[in-house]
Image (cartoon, rainbow, N blue to C red):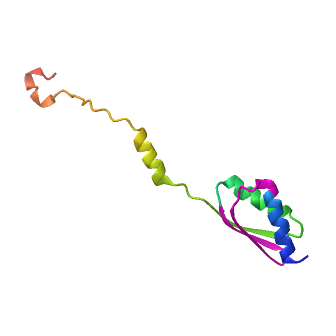
C-alpha cells in the first residue's frame, strides 16, 4: 500500500471519530509510519486522533506530534475583572497606640 493511500485512510478514520472537529491537522506517512502534526483543543481530541490513526488500514506506527491549543488567559482575566465587585466601604480597626499602659493587662 502506498503512503498516499495510508494518509487518506488515516484522515477518513480521524474524521469519523472526531466528527470533523479537528481543523488544524496534518497527516503524512513514510513507509507506513504516520506522523500527526497540528493543534487540537483537548487531550481527548489528541488521544482520539492517535487511536484513529493507529486503526487505519496500512499503518505500522504513529508519531503523535499534536499540540494542545493554549487558552487565552488575557481575555479570561479581563472577564474576571468585570465580574469582581468592588466594595467602597472602609474597614475601621481600633487604634492600639492610643491605649496607655494602665489599661493593658499584667
Magenta span has 13?
A: no
> Visible in this render: residue 60?
no
Asked if residue 53 can be seen in this view, the reply is yes
Above or below 101: residue 2: below
Residue 3, horizontal then vertical, whole percent = 84, 76
**Residue located at (79% from left, 71% from top):** 34
Image quarter hosting the C terminus: top left
35 is within the stretch colored magenta? yes
Q: Relative to residue 6, is residue 38 drawn left or right?
A: left
- Residue 75, placed above or below residue 5: above
- Counting from the top left corner in percent of width and height, residue 71 is at 54, 55
Q: Seen from this angle, which residue lies furthest right? A: 1
Horizontal arrangement in the rendering, residue 79 relative to residue 94 (left or right) = right
Q: Residue shown at 41%/41% (left/top)?
A: 82
65 or 84: nearer the viewer: 84
Residue toward you, 61 or 41: 41
Query: Which quarter of the image is occupied by the N terminus?
Result: bottom right
Question: Which residue: 26% across, 29% down?
Answer: 89
- Where is residue 15 drawn, in percent x and y? 79, 58
The magenta-colored residue range is 16-39
Q: Does 1 appear above or below 53?
A: below
Marker count (numbered) = 0
15 shown above or below 60: above
Q: On the image, which quarter does residue 88 sit in?
A: top left
Within the image, what quadrant is residue 24 found in? Answer: bottom right
Which x, y percent locates residue 50?
76, 61
Amino acid at each position: 500500500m502506498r503512503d498516499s493511500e495510508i494518509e487518506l485512510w488515516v484522515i477518513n478514520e480521524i474524521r469519523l471519530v472526531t466528527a470533523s472537529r479537528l481543523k488544524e491537522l496534518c497527516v503524512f506517512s513514510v513507509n507506513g509510519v504516520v506522523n500527526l502534526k497540528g493543534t487540537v483543543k483537548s487531550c481527548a481530541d489528541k488521544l482520539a486522533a492517535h487511536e484513529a490513526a493507529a486503526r487505519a488500514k496500512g499503518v505500522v506506527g504513529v508519531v503523535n506530534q499534536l499540540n494542545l491549543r493554549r487558552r487565552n488567559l488575557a481575555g479570561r482575566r479581563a472577564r474576571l475583572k468585570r465580574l469582581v465587585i468592588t466594595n467602597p466601604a472602609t474597614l475601621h480597626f481600633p487604634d492600639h497606640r492610643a491605649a496607655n499602659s494602665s489599661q493593658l493587662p499584667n
